[in-house]
């Protein structure tokens, strides 16, 4: 009865929007776009939650956050309590609140969403986590008694950070090995500041260091040390959260002209190396006036919006399929459009054009039409004969996906790789074919989401704990 | 942080050698491999080849020429100073085997890269002829070391101030004319030198290996900044190289890609020199 009553009352409140920077302002800076909820907005939004007896949102979350409970705590005004409730299941709520595709997860199955707009779970998650961080009240969790077991975590992206956070709390000694000079993986080299401020990632990493995780940057495992050497040095288990660090290119003529970047390079220069602050920072980046981004995923949107902020007058996304097949989140596509990014769909480049200095000046493209569905279930794009045309541009970002970086897999004996080079790991436990080695995140699944990598990390951490505490016998 | 334990100014103070504490890298590094260095928090990542390692002492040696802001900044560091990041060892080590007669040709600071490779070929039982060259006598580096690392060392200077007056490729041509037992030429130096050298050895049909130095960012195969065309295929120099079959390399493309940021490099350098009057 109470539920029904509450529902009637709460339906009057519309889904709360976050205030944000106006498009014309934000394209001139790298600051985060939305400002986040005020406590009042958060309270109103939390009040929209039906507090369902049989909630579906929890099942919709890859790490099974107790969503109704953390929202109730916000409604009650206990924001710190809410953040701690979130952290019971999700060690990186400030990040997930920003970059999770909630519309495909918790919010997609939200019962309120059947008649009204779903509860803005992501925005509330972000609010609680930001509140806790801003108050400086990040709680140091109680750790289990020391087990004397040591675990090496290779890679410090979302999967690695999750594994490290979970296992340190269980009393193990955890060492992170990161190949780059900064921790965070794709969260720092890939996702731009305007979508995920780096201070938030740093706060999460600082938190892990504070609770005892040893962090080594500049360590390329597979090169400076092999996985087998880690075992010899006394690590009982190794988790590989390497990410899908291999940029894919089109493989068409002229791709090595200057001014043709992989999205990995473009975003790494801007985000990790802070080339957008050149010459204060030493790393340069080409500032194209007329930019083309190939592909239509989230990374493409990030690249296009970065190009605008670096002073581009025109930014076009060129994609071989149609709008409905674009893999980016709708919110990201909308933001890109608001900022003035143009979309050229059903178009594919067949070669790049360049000048005598080797700089890109344009692309020859061909138009496509959609045929029968392919193995991905999406309609296959087919070139239209004789439809070639030229797109002028002075900078191209190739954002058509990533493959498996072979550096570690090929220097580690005993791993099983699939035909695309990804590490084969058990879906439920993350165990690989090699005893004592787990893997999770993009190096297993191919490019996916932060939260799925975290989910894989969570499962692997549990499995590693069981293995280490049961005498390291059972394998697989 | 990585501490500089010794510094040596070489070649008219435009080339500099650091011995740096990096025990984990020293233990693993092999000839032909390189490291990436980031000097400080605002620094860029640049690849530098190791000119030697001392696993016992836990040190690596790097030799670099001042060509831009980062190398100028590095040169301003002294003994006891610390470099923020050194990542390595990176790249595929030189494939060293006993072949017979091997000619190791180093130009400019390429000699630094060549030194451990030359030593390795000699230790593998090859007859090693080394040719090193520089624009002028004062820019010549590692003559004594190269002499010890080879059986026969030839020296050239472009201006004739020391050794043979001319290019390393002149001497190489003489040797290739004189003897027909050369199994391999390794050429490391400025791109024009490597390009010309490869053109020549191709005429003599002698297998030639070069070590390339394109612009890199992460240098672990993640970004693709260092792509080079080899035999018509795009390769990533950082993980597939840095050594390639010289007869297959598109040097013209490499030169253009190396020059991609000339404007920005000048801005950085001007700003740096403006800040440090000398």
Image: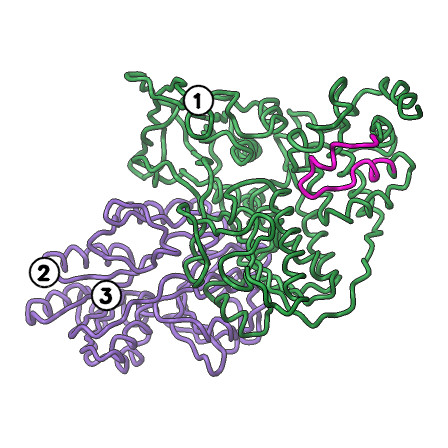
Comparing B117 with A252, the one in front is: A252
Alpha-carbon distance for marks 1 and 3?
51 Å
The residue positioned 87% from the left and 21% from the top of the image is: A7
Which tint is chain B?
purple
Q: Mark 2 lies on which chain?
A: B
Pointer 3 indicates a residue of which chain?
Answer: B
Residue at mark 2 = B204
Return the disc, 2 or 3, that comes first in the chain's sequence: 3
Q: Mark 1 points at which residue?
A: A379
Q: Which-is-in-front pick, marks 2 and 1?
A: 1
Residue at 25% from the left image edge and 44% from the top image edge: B232
Q: How far apart are marks 2 and 3 (CA)?
A: 14 Å
Query: Against B241, is A422 above or below?
Result: above
Q: Position of residue B92 (x, y in %)?
A: 36, 62
Q: Dot 1: within a 10 Å radius of its alpha carbon, few (fewer than 14), some, or many (20 or more) residues?
A: some
Left or right, B51 with respect to A195, comes to left
> Which residue range is magenta in the image?
A52-72
Identify the secondary structure beneath mark 3. Answer: strand
Q: Place residue B132 in its image quadrant.
A: bottom left
Label 2, residues with CA under 10 Å away: few <14, some 14-19, many ≥20: some
Which element is circle 2 on? loop
Q: Which chain carries label 1?
A: A
Residue A224 location, x and y as percent? Answer: 48, 67
Question: Which of these two is toward me, B29 or B277?
Answer: B29
Q: Is residue B131 above or below residue B192?
A: below
**Residue B70 x/y as whole percent:** 49, 58
Residue A29 spot, x, y in % from top left: 64, 35
Q: Which chain is green?
A: A
Which residue in the protein does label 3 denote?
Answer: B186
Q: In which quarter of the image is the C terminus of chain A?
A: bottom right
């Amino acid at each position: 009865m109470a539920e029904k009553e509450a529902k009637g009352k709460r339906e009057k409140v519309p889904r709360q929007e976050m205030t944000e920077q106006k498009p014309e302002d934000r394209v001139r800076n790298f600051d985060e776009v939305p400002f986040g909820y005020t406590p009042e907005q958060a309270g109103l939004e939390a009040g929209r939650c039906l507090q369902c007896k049989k909630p579906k949102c929890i099942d919709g979350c890859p790490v099974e956050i107790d969503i109704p409970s953390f929202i109730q705590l916000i409604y009650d005004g206990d924001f710190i309590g809410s953040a701690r409730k979130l952290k019971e299941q999700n060690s990186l709520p400030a990040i997930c609140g920003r970059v999770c595709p909630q519309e495909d997860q918790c919010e997609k199955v939200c019962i309120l969403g059947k008649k009204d707009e779903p509860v803005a779970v992501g925005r509330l998650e972000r609010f609680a986590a930001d509140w806790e961080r801003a108050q400086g009240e990040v709680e140091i969790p109680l750790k289990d008694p020391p087990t004397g077991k040591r675990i090496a975590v290779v890679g410090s992206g979302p999967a690695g950070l999750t594994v490290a956070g979970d296992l340190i709390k269980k009393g193990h000694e955890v060492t992170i090995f990161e190949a780059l000079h900064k921790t965070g993986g794709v969260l720092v080299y890939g996702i731009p500041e305007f979508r995920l401020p780096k201070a938030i990632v740093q706060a999460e990493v600082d938190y892990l260091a504070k609770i005892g995780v040893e962090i080594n940057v500049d360590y390329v495992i597979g090169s400076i040390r092999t996985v087998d050497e880690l075992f010899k040095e006394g690590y009982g288990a190794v988790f590989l959260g390497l990410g899908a660090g291999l940029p894919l290119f089109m493989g068409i003529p002229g791709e090595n002209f200057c001014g043709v970047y992989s999205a990995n390079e473009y975003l790494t220069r801007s985000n990790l190396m802070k080339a957008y602050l050149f010459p204060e920072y030493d790393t340069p980046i080409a500032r194209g006036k007329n930019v083309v981004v190939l592909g239509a995923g989230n990374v493409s949107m990030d690249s296009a919006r970065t190009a605008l902020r670096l002073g581009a007058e025109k930014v076009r996304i060129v994609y071989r399929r149609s709008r409905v097949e674009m893999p980016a989140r709708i919110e990201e596509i909308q933001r890109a459009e608001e900022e003035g990014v143009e979309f050229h769909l059903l178009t594919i480049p067949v070669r790049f054009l360049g000048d005598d200095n080797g700089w890109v000046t344009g692309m020859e493209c061909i138009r496509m039409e959609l045929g029968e569905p392919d193995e991905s279930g999406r309609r296959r794009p087919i070139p239209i004969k004789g439809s070639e045309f030229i797109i002028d541009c002075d900078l191209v970002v190739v954002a058509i996906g990533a493959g498996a970086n072979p550096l570690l897999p090929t220097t580690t004996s005993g791993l099983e790789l699939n035909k695309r080079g990804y590490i084969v790991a058990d879906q439920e436990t993350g165990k690989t074919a090699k005893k004592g080695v787990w893997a999770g995140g993009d190096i297993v699944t191919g490019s996916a989401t932060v939260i799925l990598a975290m989910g894989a990390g969570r499962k692997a951490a549990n499995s590693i704990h069981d293995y280490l505490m049961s005498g390291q016998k059972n394998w697989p | 942080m990585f501490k500089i334990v010794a510094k040596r100014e070489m070649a008219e103070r435009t080339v500099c050698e650091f011995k740096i504490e990096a025990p984990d890298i020293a233990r693993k590094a092999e000839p032909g491999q390189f490291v990436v260095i980031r000097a400080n928090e605002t620094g860029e990542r640049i690849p530098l080849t190791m000119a030697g390692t001392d696993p016992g002492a836990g040190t690596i040696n790097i030799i670099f020429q001042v060509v831009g802001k980062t190398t100028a900044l590095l040169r301003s560091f002294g003994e006891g100073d610390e470099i923020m990041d050194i990542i390595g060892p990176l790249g595929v080590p030189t494939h060293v085997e006993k072949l017979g007669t091997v000619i190791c040709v180093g130009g400019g600071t390429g000699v630094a890269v060549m030194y451990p490779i030359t030593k390795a070929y000699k230790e593998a039982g090859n007859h090693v002829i080394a040719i090193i060259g520089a624009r002028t006598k004062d820019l010549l580096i590692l003559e004594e070391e190269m002499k010890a690392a080879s059986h026969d060392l030839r020296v050239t200077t472009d201006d004739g101030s020391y050794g043979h007056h001319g290019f390393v490729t002149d001497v190489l041509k003489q040797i290739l004319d004189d003897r027909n037992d050369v199994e391999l030429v390794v050429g490391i130096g400025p791109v024009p030198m490597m390009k010309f050298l490869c053109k020549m050895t191709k005429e003599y049909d002698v297998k030639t290996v070069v070590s390339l130095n394109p612009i890199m960012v992460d240098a672990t195969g993640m970004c693709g900044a260092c792509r080079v065309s080899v035999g018509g295929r795009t390769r990533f120099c950082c993980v597939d190289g840095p050594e390639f079959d010289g007869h297959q390399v598109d040097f013209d493309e490499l030169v253009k890609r190396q020059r991609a940021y000339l404007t920005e490099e000048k801005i950085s350098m001007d700003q740096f020199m403006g800040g440090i009057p000398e």
